[in-house]
Amino acid sequence: MRAIQLHAFGDPDRLVLDDLPDLSPGPDQVRIAVESSGVHLLDTSLRRGETGPLPLPELPTVPGREVAGTVDAVGDAVDPEWLGRRVVAHLGPVPGGYAQQAVTSLANLIPVPAGLTLDEAVGLVGTGRTAEGILEQAGLSAEDTVLIPAAAGGLGWLLTQAALTAGATVIAAAGGPEKVRRLRELGAQAVDYHEPDWAAAIGRAATVVLDGVGGAIGRRAMHQLAPGGRMLMFGYSSGTPTEVTTADLIALNISAGWNLGPRMFARPGGIRGLAEQALARGARGEWRPLISAYPLEEAARAHRDLEERRTVGKVVLRSSPGQSSPSVENATTPRRI
């Protein structure tokens, strides 16, 4: 099989296409003929050799933890009815997603609902479950005005759709006119946070901030909360968390929280339940991920574009023959089935 391997930590060019032996499933495992692999910002940190929520892998390694495809082999004690089924899986802490084959346990498998493409399934199994966890905690309603930084990313795009569906007023912040245009087509009010006066254009209007960016953008977003507003922080793609002090909370009369991960794992149904909810939402047409797709062999370019904020939506690698340049699926309007 062909797979992307990382032989040494460093820049995106360290990701190389190799020929590796075919995989064989063990007991209670299946092998997936992978057609779509998810690329996560965390993958870029691990590639650089930076420690974080996951330990650094032993090298060489095949990066990636989100895969979708068709089951083409099963291990001992696995029902052969799985053969030929379209499935999606989050591989958990074990990498191996940037490849034409992946082996995983039955516990990780979720059948792909009819009406969803494999790219969309990959865009929902990890990013979608995170979005579901955020939405459970945010409790959005039609009375809310929701400010979402990085709204044109894979997670922000889903949160924007969900907030609009809830009837909320959505202020979607993104970097660059093309991303702003796409968000406006989705139905959100959109601002370009590359513009120096983007926050002034909002004023203290937001009742909720959903912050996965952190840094200076997170700080400015916090200051757009109306008195009594609430801020949910769940990441810091800028490289640094949003700085929040007790003095901030008192002066602005707001609340802020960061406890998403433990809550997601401790909830009834666990994190798998959130992934199933996200896929069901996609099958109903309520969510349609925005996809930036690259051929498997161009994983280095996908990483570089993601790090330099040139991508929109969820970045995926396609194992089947594809275009030599990235394609962006038109996901402006939620698909109705």
Image (tube, rainbow, N blue to C red):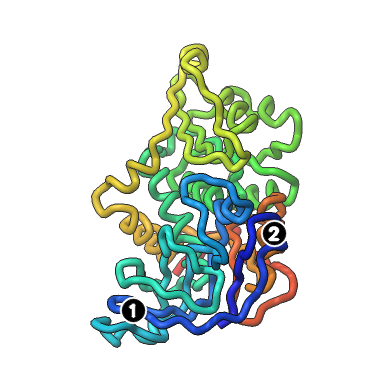
The one nearer the camera, 71 or 30, is 30
Give above or below for 281 relative to 102: above
Q: Which residue is mark 2?
A: 12
Which residue: 59% across, 34% down? Answer: 240
Q: Amino acid at mark 2?
A: Pro
Residue 76 visible in rendering: yes
Residue 115 image-quadrant placement: bottom left
Residue depicted at 67% across the width and 70% down the height: 16
Badge 1: few (under 14), some or many (20 or more) residues near its Cα, within 10 Å? some
Q: Identify the residue under disc 1.
A: 26
Residue at 71% x, 76% y: name it.
323
Q: Quadrant of the C terminus?
A: bottom left
The N terminus is located in which quarter?
bottom right
Q: Is residue 113 left or right of residue 152?
A: left
Secondary structure at numbered mark 1: loop
**Mark 1–mark 2 distance (CA, rounded to whole Å):** 32 Å
Pick the residue in front: 89 or 206: 89
Answer whether labels 1 and 2 touch (C-beta < 8 Å): no
Q: Quadrant of residue 224?
A: top right
Query: The residue tagged with tag 2: helix, strand or loop?
Result: helix
